[in-house]
Image (cartoon, helix red, strand yellow):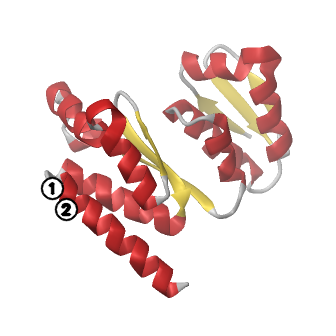
Amino acid sequence: MRLLSLPKKTLNLLKKDGGKIFKDVAERGGVDLAINDSDVAIEGEGGTEWIVEQVLKALAYGFQPRQAFKLFSDDYFLEAIDLRNAFHGNEKKMRRYKARIIGQQGAAKKKLQELSGAFLAVGPEHIAILGEFEDLRAAKEAVLRLLEGSEHVGVYSYLEREKHRQKKLM
């Protein structure tokens, strides 16, 4: 059994519409789920508990259910960059660098997703990436380059080269 602590917002999402998402996660994952005040208990066989935990974490990071449910496939992975650790809790720096990832009216985030093929979720203290292995790897490298101060144009060029390289390998 696994016990996962989730934000109140995510718990409310799971309970929304009579618990539809909650039931979908349990059914697709083949596990029993129980919600209490701030935790979700996951009871299942083998690796199913871990997969359901990843799906619930994706929902907590802010991914839409249809995106988070991709984690039920063996082809998709989830990774998060903790901005508190990266910027030693400096709120001003975290805001500034999150803004670099998002861009004006979400344009940079949209372009990163389009070029990498991965999904991004930018939260208060994290940047989460969900995608197939190579897409996730490229998106993570792009995000890290932006966090290190690289220009957007250079990062977009990197992603275009990576996409071209991946196509050649197929």
108 over 6 or under it: above or below:
below
Q: Residue at x 19, y 62 (%)?
A: 154
Residue under numbered circle 2: 154
Q: Quarter-wise, where is residue 65 in the image?
A: top right
Q: How many numbered discs, if any?
A: 2
Q: Position of residue 118 (x, y in %)?
A: 49, 54
Q: Could you tell me which secondary element the residue under label 1 belongs to?
A: loop
Neighbourhood count class around disc 1 (C-alpha, 10 Å): few under 14, some 14–19, many 20 upward: few
> What amino acid is labelled 2 in the image?
Gly
Q: Position of residue 91 (x, y in %)?
A: 20, 26
Q: Is residue 42 left or right of residue 79?
A: right
Which residue is more in the foreground, 161 or 42?
Answer: 161
- Is residue 96 visible in the rendered structure shown here? yes
Residue under numbered circle 1: 150
158 over 129 or under it: above or below:
below
Q: Nearer the viewer, mark 2 or mark 1?
A: 2
**The N terminus - image quarter:** top right
> What amino acid is labelled 1 in the image?
Ser
